[in-house]
Image: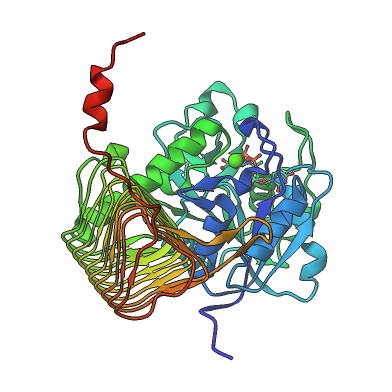
Amino acid sequence: MTQLANPNTRAVVLAAGHGKRMKSNYPKVLHKIAGRAIIARITDALDKLELEHVHVVVGHGAKEVEEFLVGHPPKTSWSVHLQEPQLGTGHALMQVVPALTSFVGVLLVTVADTPLIQPQTLKLLLNTHVKQQAALSLLTTIVPDAKNYGRIIRNQQGLVVQIVEDKDADSQQKEVKEINPAIYCLEWPQVLSGLQSLTNNNKGQEYYLTDLIEWAVASNLCVATAVADNWREVAGVNSRSELAEACRLLNDRVLTSLATESGVTVVDPQSTWIAPEVSVGSDTIILPGCYLTGDIKIGRSCVIGPHTVMEGPLRVGDYSKVVLSLITGSEVGAYCRVGPFAHLREGVLIRDDVRVGNFVEVKKSMVGPNTNISHLSYVGNATIGAKVNIGAGTITANYDHITGLKAETVIGDEAATGSNSVLVAPVVVGAGSVVAAGTVVTRDVPDGALAVGRAHLEVKACWADRKRRQPKS
Ligand code: UD1
Ligand code: CA
């Protein structure tokens, strides 16, 4: 087994609260920030620390949160612990105590609604805790607007003596701008007796974890603080407007890093939304109105947008252009041109130098290099070779609505389909063959052949002129 960076260190994520201020039917921690659930953003940060275990306390919406974690498991070994009813953050941590009977080490306890926290800030707290041999360490930060945060109360020597919740604070305490992000390191089992001594004697009638500080001070234990210099990282999400604010703060962070570290031009940061999982090569230009989430890798010198939505996992090769389009779960090669109004809809693999043009939908298909699908086509469950020309309005009829099954279309290299041809799958259109405009292809076309199937065309000379000359009745 490989050695963990932080053995004997476990995290506790408090995720049982109701999140009433969200006014939502869903648990707060499952709301998304830049395409990823709040709780997953926390476990992502914890995974970077290489801890021994993550204990997640669930309560409100416990089933949904647990199901989400099963579907999106942290890399660190993890378990859930039910808090029912939810009687406060101190009570939430108590629910993990039975699982800690043989544990001796550091507990990194965090609320689950600060999704912008960075691993390096958590490391700063851990290092402070270890270096100062503290019994309890807490992160603090200075905010421009202390809102509903717990205030850090220091004595004349500058030592933390208490955290006062906003609703319990007097007017002088409310002036304090140093707040409690609610991320702590606890020396275990040293703090257990403090945890057991918490009471709910406060306005919220809750067992506040924050009261542990007063207990530690009264017990003459070492309380250490690490001050995070960027308050934006610990912005808590309690309401829809704080959710929007957190999205904006994360977006600003991502766009700044793309500009300064990756050499990417974002023409309009106000209308461009890019998740932290997205990587973009240098000299790529992102035009206004783009929304990119998930595992996305865009190459160098591309032009993306305006008004393009991408949902990863997906790749776009170097020098490609994507305009006014929607792409999900696909791969686009280099030197491609996609859009306007193209929809690449899951499982699409497009090789280099391909044109997928106006009003074209492609699904679960492979498109060979130098192929054009320029206008008004639907390509589904197809394998298309190199240098193929798919004419305007070509449709792969891949779906049998009686059986509900999809069938495959194969189009060989250098074949061409004329406008408005329908390829009724399963069918093979051989290499170098031509399908005439308006043809419905219901059986395989050999290599190099012509497939033509149209209603007989009649042209009646002078018919229209005669009709015009007829007297109107
Ligand atoms: C808490 C802190 C406050 C801090 C703020 C930072 C306390 C008493 N207050 O306040 O000092 O400034 O976070 O964002 O700790 N939870 C449970 N079980 C419960 C109650 C809450 O698991 O019974 C979880 C929630 O799911 C949430 C977290 O604990 O993830 C914090 O709860 P919340 O109600 O948001 O506390 P705040 O009022 O924000
Ligand atoms: Ca909160």
Q: Residue 111 at what x, y percent from top left?
A: 61, 50
The quarter of the picture where residue 271 lies is top left
Let me know if residue 121 appears in the view. no
Q: Nearer the viewer, residue 469 or 380?
A: 469
Q: Residue 362 at what x, y percent from top left?
A: 41, 59
Q: Residue at x 54, y 33 (%)?
A: 240
Q: Is residue 191 left or right of residue 257?
A: right
The quarter of the picture where residue 232 lies is top left
Within the displayed image, which quadrant is ligand 1 positioned in? top right
Let me know if residue 67 appears in the view. yes
Position of residue 394 relative to residue 408, above or below, is above
- Classify the position of the C terminus by image quarter: top left
Q: Residue 312 at what x, y percent from top left?
A: 44, 60
Q: Is residue 84 left or right of residue 103?
A: right
Position of residue 430 relative to residue 472, above or below, is below
- Classify the position of the N terminus by image quarter: bottom right
Q: Nearer the viewer, residue 255 or 142?
A: 255
Q: Nearer the viewer, residue 464 or 281?
A: 464
Q: Residue 260 at what x, y percent from top left?
A: 20, 56
The quarter of the picture where residue 145 lies is top left
